[in-house]
Each structure stands twice: as C-alpha cells, then as structure tokens.
Image: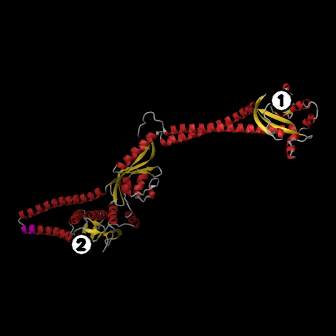
Amino acid sequence: MLKRVGHERSVARQVLVLQLVAVLVLVVTALALATYDARSDIRASARDEAVSVAQAVARSPVVHQAMDTGDPSELIQPFAEAVRVDTGVDFVVVMAPDRTRFSHPNPELLGQAFIGNLGGAPEGEVYTEEYVGTLGPSIRSIVPVFAGTGVGAAAGAAAGAAAEDVVAMVSVGITLRQLDDLLVDEFWDIVVAALAVLLVGICGAWFISHRLRRQTHGLGEREITRMYEYYRAVLHAVREGLLLIDLDGRVQLVNDEARRLLRLPDDVVGRSLSELGLPPALVEAASGARGADEVYVTGDHVLVASTSTALWEGREVGAVVTLRDHTELQALTGELDVVRGLTESLRAQTHEAANRLHTVVSLIEMGRPEQAVEFVTGELQVAQMLTDQVVGAVEEPVVAALLLGKTAEASERGVQLTVTGELPAGDLAAGESEISTRDLVTVLGNLVDNALDAVAGRTDRRIVVHLEGAERHVRLVVGDSGPGLTAEEAAHALERGWTTKADTGDGSGVGLALVSQVARRLGGSVTIGRSPLGGAELTVVLGSAS
C-alpha cells in the first residue's frame, strides 16, 4: 500500500468541493434569473393594471358628466382619489387635451400641466411608459376619453373615432418604489426556495463524496494515478501469471503471462472463473480454499498455483492467484524419476548380486563347483532373458531403460510386468510435431506407475505393456489386474485438467492429466477400457496412423 504524500487532498474531497461550488453557482444563477423574471412579471402586471384602471376611469359616466360642467375637477378629483385608493395605484390623473390636470393625489397640482409624454393618446391610442414625474419614477398609462356619454376608449377606437373626438385623457401610474417593495416580498420567497435547493444539493454532494471516498479509499488523484501506473508496470513485468479475483469469483485484473498460461480471452476482465473453461479444481481453489504451490494441468501447461487472500485495511476484497509454468520442470522431473528408479534398481541388484556371489563362493569352498556353476548360469539366464525381452521389443534406449527400471521395481513389489509389441528407435513425426523420447517417458512412466498403484495389495498382480510404433504413429497399451475404473471415474480421469491435488495435498493426481495433455498436443487420444486381466486398460495413441 502506498503512503499518502504531503497534504494531497483525496479525490472524494476534491469532488465534494467542486460539487459544492457547482451547486452554489447554479443556485445563485437560478436566484438571479428568478429575481429578474419576477421583476419583469411585476412590471408587466403593473403596466396591464395601469391600462385597465385608466380604461375603466375613461369609460366612467362621472368623467363624461364632469367634462360638461364648468369645473370638471369638482367631480373628477374625489372620484379619481376613490379609484386610486380602491385599486392601490399611486395616482389617477384626468387631464384636458391641453394637459391641464383635473385630478391629482396632490391637490396643489390641480390646474397645472401634466408632466410627461402623451404618445399617441391625443390621437386616440393607448400609450404606456416609464417616466420620472412629480411622485418619482413610475410606470404609467395614458388612455384617451372620447366624446359621448359612457363611451370608453375601446368603444371609440372600435368605432374609428378621430382625434377631434378626444375630450380628455386619463393617466394612471404605479411608482417603481411600490413595485420594488413587491419584488422584495417575492424575493424572500425565492431565497427560501433557493436555500432549500442549496441544502438538498449539499446533502447530495456529501453523500456522493462519502461513497466515492469509501470506493477510492481516501486516495488523491496523483496517488491513484501513481498506483495504477506502478501496479500495471509491475503486473505485466513479472514472469509469473497473476489473477486478481473479487469476492464474487470474477476476474478484476490479469497480466500477460496469466493470459498465455490459461489461454484467456481479451474480454476476461469482469467474467466469472467458471465461464473460462479452466480446470474445476483450479476454479474451486481460486474461489474458495487458499493454498500454496498446488499443481494443476491446463491445456498444454503444468501449473503451480498459489492462492492467497487480498486484504485492504483488514477487510477481505478478493483473492490473488499466482501461476508458475512448470511444464518443462515436470518433464525433467519425470526423467529424473526414471534415473532415480534405475539407480535404486541397480542398488538393489548390487545387494542381490553380493548375496549371490557369497552363495557361489560358499558352494566352491564346500567343494561343490558344479552346483555353483549351475546356480550362476541360471541367474544369468533369467536376467538375460528379461533384458533381451525388453531390448528386443524397444529399440529406443531411453524407453528401454525406463521399462527395465519399471520391471525391476515391479519385481521388487511382487508384480509381474510383461512387455509385448515393438517400438522402433529414432524420432517419430506426428504431424508438425515430433514424438520425442521425453513424451514417451512421460506417457509410459505415468501409465506404469498408475498400474503399479492399482495392483498393490491384491493377490493377482500382473501388468502388461503393449507397444506399437510406425513412422508417424505410436500406440501404447497398459493393462493391469487391479480393480479397474467405473464409468464416472473414467470420465473424471480424462477430464481436462482433472486432479485430486486439492484434496490429497501430496502432489499426486496429475499423471493421467499429463498423459492426456501429451496426447492432445501430438494429435492423439487416450481411451480407458477394461483389461483382459480384469483391471483397467489405458490405450494412448500419439500421432496419426498413415
């Protein structure tokens, strides 16, 4: 685990800060836009209200009656003030076409000229504007009053009234100060909503940050980048195969050597081990029990696998499977076993020869030379017959030595081993590959060893080895008088990569898997049947018959 460097902030904290800034900017922007929209709505509503009130006043019979009197202000002033109070506007001004005021909130301004633009009102149009008058900045509307009792601006315009029909004008206004007060009241509602949104955003950002911190283990971006670069470089540089498995048995990380040894597809990451066609024992060991240096056979490789638990801060996060290729080492070990067997056989024969020599010497000392010669001649004849039998059947010296050693071992264990058939010397081609002596030693050695184990402890202990060889084809048959194999046992024995190593723990159980591996590589086959001796009979074909 890499240590924290300096005061680098974790990715989770940086994301939290960025999210808080983003939420704050969005909320402030939304608040500004909402305030601007509310201001526009308030002013548009105020403009519509001013026009509506002005049109209602212009249609009022009171205004028309007042225009027929000598002093219009006497009727219009109290009426306009009542309308102003009832509607909540800031002023209602009725004026003559020459701008003379007939009403105003300030009675002192009655009779004075109206201040502001009239727009198209003198020509019979409705006009609105924002203007600074005697009451300050305001939104005002100016509506014409047409001649005719009870006829308003709209009716006059609909009738196509001319400018000379305008007898008065009504101006209604709402000060911006009142609109700002309304905006302030609405602004606080907007602020409360914005604060609620901000609070929700902060809680969401904190939750995301907390989850991200847990998933990234509180590491900073440079630490994560450094770990990724270093771990990836180390992962692909090591000569051993590495597999990282999560708690669900899915591959999370794999290096090039593991892909080569297990022949994994490119899309292996994220897939379950059980979907990859690996040996069941290897899948079981990687997903469950933990162990070191366990032997498995997969495809063309003999692998030594070690499985250990992957921990982070005391919590199990999966398993690490280490794979080493021991194919060549296994073959060399087989040859070494042959040499060791020959050595032990020679040692035993040396001890036996010494006993026989003492017997011959004793017979001569006892004055019985004829019996000594007969004894020696008989022993030599038996040994020579055995050697002639094996050498006559097998011209390949390494294989002959293997069979001689196995014959001696069988003799010591009280087993009768018979070799029949014929195997020529020299390299034997099998398609594009050659059937080497190493392959023959692997196949024969494992078959005979299994047969010796099968007949051990039985009354009838016999083994027959039959050899057939041609230019591109070798057939090896090993039968025994043991208990044989059931159909279920035979199916498991030939299963790809099958081994009992995970159960026994002693390194055994890969013999038939190695034999099957060699046969597949050389384009051959392995068949399990019933021997005429009563036990199992294994037939191995290497190469193709031609």
Image quadrant in which the C terminus is located: bottom left
Q: Name the outermost residue toward the top.
A: 108
Q: Is residue 376 left or right of residue 219?
A: left
Residue 75 visible in the current orientation: yes
Q: Relative to residue 237, is residue 385 depicted above or below? A: below
Disc on the earlier residue, 2 or 1? 1
In the rendered image, which residue does mark 2 sit on?
Answer: 422
Q: Position of residue 479 (x, y in %)?
A: 30, 69
In the rendered image, which residue does mark 1 sit on?
Answer: 113
Image quadrant in which the N terminus is located: top left
Quarter-of-image position of residue 528: bottom left
Q: Position of residue 539 (x, y in %)?
A: 32, 69
Measure the C-alpha gap from mark 2 to mark 1.
Answer: 138 Å
Q: Which residues are magenta?
A: 369-373
Q: Relative to residue 347, is residue 290 depicted above or below? A: above
Q: Is residue 237 magenta-colored?
A: no
Q: Main secondary structure of the magenta part?
A: helix
